[in-house]
Image (spheres, rainbow, N blue to C red):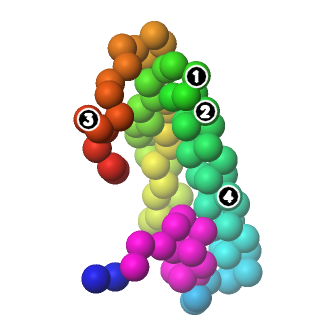
């Protein structure tokens, strides 16, 4: 079984043949995703449900990237911890 890598490790593993500018951009994405995940966990701990969905796709020179927006449900009923699934 392949060990599960975190976002930063995956980004670094995939950046081997990228230019320095591309590597810096990927590191920024990985760092920002880590901060986003922390913010989502804080929001859930504060009592809201958060879903991140693709709102659009940015295209440039044959490449693309997903743009995201949060869907927030304030005051969502709590679910017992054992019913949560790992994503």
First in residue order: circle 1 vs circle 3: 1
Looking at the image, which is closer to me, 83 or 55? 83
Dot 2 alpha-carbon crowd within 10 angstroms: few under 14, some 14 to 19, many 20 or more:
few
Measure how far apart labels 3 and 2 are at the Cα level: 19 Å
Measure how far apart labels 2 and 4 are at the Cα level: 17 Å
Is residue 21 placed above or below 48 in the rendered structure?
below
Is disc 1 in contact with disc 2, using a CB cutoff of under 8 Å? yes
Does dot 1 land on a helix, a strand or a loop?
A: loop
Q: Residue at x 34, y 82 (%)?
A: 2
Q: Which residue is mark 3?
A: 83
Q: Quadrant of residue 45?
A: top right
**Magenta residue span:** 3-15
Measure how far apart labels 1 and 2 are at the Cα level: 6 Å
Q: Which residue is mark 4?
A: 31
Is residue 18 placed above or below 84 in the rendered structure?
below
Whether residue 2 can be seen here: yes
């Amino acid at each position: 079984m392949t060990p599960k890598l975190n976002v930063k490790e995956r980004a670094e593993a995939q950046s081997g043949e990228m230019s320095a500018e591309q590597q810096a951009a990927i590191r920024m994405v990985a760092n920002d995703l880590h901060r986003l995940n922390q913010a989502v966990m804080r929001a859930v701990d504060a009592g809201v449900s958060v879903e991140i969905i693709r709102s659009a796709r940015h295209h440039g020179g044959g490449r693309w990237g997903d743009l995201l927006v949060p869907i927030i449900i304030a005051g969502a009923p709590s679910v017992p911890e054992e019913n949560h699934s790992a994503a």
